[in-house]
Image (cartoon, rainbow, N blue to C red):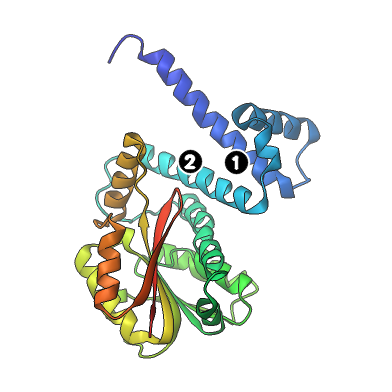
Amino acid sequence: MSENFIPRLQELAKSVRMLALVGASIKLRSDASVAQDIREQIDAGARMALGEVGDAADEDQVSLALTMVEMALSEAGELFRNPDRGSNWEIVDVAAMQAMGRASKSVFTRILSIAEAHPKMRKTFQGTFLDVGTGVAGIALEAARTCPDIKVDGIDIWEPALELARQNVVESFYSDRVNIRNLDVSMLEECKRYSLAWLPTMFLKRPIVEAALDRIARASVSDAYLFAGVYSRPKDPFLALMANLRTLRSGGEISDPADIKAMMEARGYVDVEMSSTPVATFVFGRLP
């Protein structure tokens, strides 16, 4: 390393702290319990990081911002603590899993936003939603919270996360509508049950994605929608590297949304579209 790398590290460390201040400031918007002098310092630090523009953000922007901050800090911390972790998602840290669950809520927020322009999609919120890779049930519980007529089946194979998911469901207001199971999606046996499904391909190898698409199609009712997610690959070379690393360390391998689109169309899905956010690209279509 160059002898001048310490000043550069100081700048990077400053950026991390500024990001944490932005996230803390957003969280405190709905929390009046913090001492006023501490809150003032946190808010001042967030304004130093973002400028006054942060104060004018609407609710959708605030939600996306909090997701980005929490995901960045959680991912960075886990990578630093466990750089030797291989290509899997066998995370056991409770705080990290719960943080990922909170961040994942934005998946269903995005689905709701997309549905505003798709009348047939809105009808799926009165059926049963399949949440593949439910983790600690962040997406499942957000679906139940925002859609009072929906039922949710959350499936996963990582038991430490499922233990937290069951606890989170029991402690919620939606335990009568959210069911959590230890089940590999490639072993899904249901037939004509689901009106809506979420498949996070970033956690799955290609053969599993292929098998999952077959099983989900068989398990779906007429006019059901499937949303498949991949991590977005920004044009920025460093952020693209991080997206690739995130996919590999999550156990996945497919990073091109066009591949997912072709797979879905091969299984009969129609009106297949894509919608991208800075974090993930959603590929979605309807099964006639």
Disc 1 element: helix
Vertical arrangement, residue 78 with respect to residue 221, above or below = above
- Evaluate if marks 1 and 2 touch, with contact meaning CB atoms under 8 Å apart: yes
Hey, which quadrant is residue 167 in on the image? bottom right
The residue that mark 1 highlights is 23
Residue 275 in picture, x, y percent from top left: 43, 59
The residue that mark 2 highlights is 73
Q: Quadrant of the C terminus?
A: bottom left
Q: Quadrant of the N terminus?
A: top left
Hey, which quadrant is residue 168 in on the image? bottom right
Dot 1 alpha-carbon crowd within 10 angstroms: few under 14, some 14 to 19, many 20 or more: many
Q: Nearer the viewer, residue 222 or 117?
A: 117
Vertical arrangement, residue 2 with respect to residue 262, above or below = above
| Callout 1 amino acid | Gly
Q: Residue at x 28, y 74 (%)?
A: 265
Vertical arrangement, residue 273 with respect to residue 277, above or below = below
Q: Is residue 188 visible?
A: no
Q: Which mark is residue 35?
A: none
Left or right of residue 242: residue 148: right
Q: State how far apart marks 1 and 2 are (Cα).
A: 10 Å
Left or right of residue 60: residue 163: left
Residue 120 in picture, x, y percent from top left: 51, 80
Q: Earlier in the sequence, mark 1 or mark 2?
A: 1
**Number of numbered discs present?**
2
Residue 170 in picture, x, y percent from top left: 58, 73
| Callout 2 amino acid | Leu
Q: Is residue 209 visible?
A: yes
Q: Residue at x 54, y 69 (%)?
A: 117
Vertical arrangement, residue 273 with respect to residue 77, above or below = below
Q: Residue at x 46, y 67 (%)?
A: 163
Dot 2 alpha-carbon crowd within 10 angstroms: few under 14, some 14 to 19, many 20 or more: some
Disc 2 element: helix
